[in-house]
Amino acid sequence: MTDAAVSGVGAELARAREERGLALTDVAQQLKFAARQLEALEQERFEALPGGTSVRGMVRAYARLLKIDAEPLLGRLADRFDAPDANSLAARYKQPVPFSDGTRRSTFVYLGASLGVLVAVGAIAYQWYSEHNAPKAAVASAPKATKPAERPAPAERPAPAERPAPAAVQPVVEAKASEKIAAVAKEKTIPAPEKAETTDKVDRTSTDRAAIDKAERAVKEAALIQKPIPAGVHRIVFHCEAEAWLEVKDAAGRQILSSLNPPGCERVVQGRGPFELVIGNASHVRVLHNDRQLDLQPHTRQDIARFTIP
């Protein structure tokens, strides 16, 4: 007796299909199976089918389509297909999945291309950052030219109503007596003889120049001495032989004078004391207080004199 006679599953399915007037191709189209697989099932050539599980699924779907009970048919197939061994299934799933060399090469190529793209993007971002931040860094690092800060003279405070300040208290800076100096210089100028030698001309010119400078200083001091000084008022005269810093504050702490003065400059301050004086390059500055020259040496440290005139 053959296996087909024992089971009769395929024959029963084929008979039920023919009774319903269905062709094998119609069943294959509805069940989405190949016609050759259904033909092998009806002929019970189970070795041509994928396996026991697939056969059971095909029988169940075929019986549902033909509207017959699938359980008796599946029961007759139980003897034909052994239950799957759990150990064999586990061993099958533990087997490594084979990869072709072509797949491995494509994976390495993909990784290399990805790394190349990342490196290129990083380089572009770094270049952009450097180009946009370099001008700012250059401006920040450029040294700024510093100029000697000159303290602005503060605005004078109005005197209280109950204590009006006398007009002589206001400090004044007198201008140079340019007209008198020019007159003295004109009188002291001695023309050289036309037939004198060159060396005599140079000596006489130097002598004349020294006489003119001496006369200028005398005229300046005389012009200052001639002006009467009111009672209680101080007159301070600064003669700068070289560039010097002069700073004078009155009793109220106001800055009367604060400036850097060129060589040959003369500044005059007049008012009521006490006065606080700061003189830079003090060794090249002469100070007259009420027509009396002051000795700056006791008050000088590192060529800066600091003292108070009461």
Image: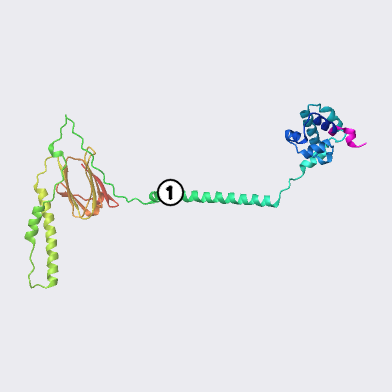
The quarter in which the C terminus is drawn is: top left
Nearer the observer, 240 or 46: 46
Q: Secondary structure at mark 1?
A: helix
178 vs 22: above or below? below
Q: Find disc 1 in the rendering and name its residue.
A: 132
Q: Residue furthest right?
A: 1
Question: Which amino acid is tagged 1?
Answer: His
- Total marks shown come to 1
For label 1, count other residues whose C-alpha is less than 10 Å away and answer few (under 14), some (14-19) or many (20+): few
> What residue is drawn where x is 80% and y is 41%?
91
The quarter in which the N terminus is drawn is: top right
Dividing the picture into quadrants, the one containing residue 203 is bottom left
Nearer the observer, 283 or 249: 249
Is residue 236 a member of the stretch shown in magenta?
no
Q: How is the image coloured?
A: rainbow
Residue range highlighted in magenta = 1-10
Is residue 3 a member of the stretch shown in magenta?
yes
> What residue is drawn where x is 84% and y is 41%?
47
Residue 228 percent across, percent down from the top left: 9, 44
Q: Main secondary structure of the magenta part?
A: helix
Residue 305 percent across, percent down from the top left: 26, 49
Residue 127 percent across, percent down from the top left: 47, 51
Left/right of residue 100 with respect to residue 233 in the rendered view: right
Left/right of residue 3 with respect to residue 156 in the rendered view: right
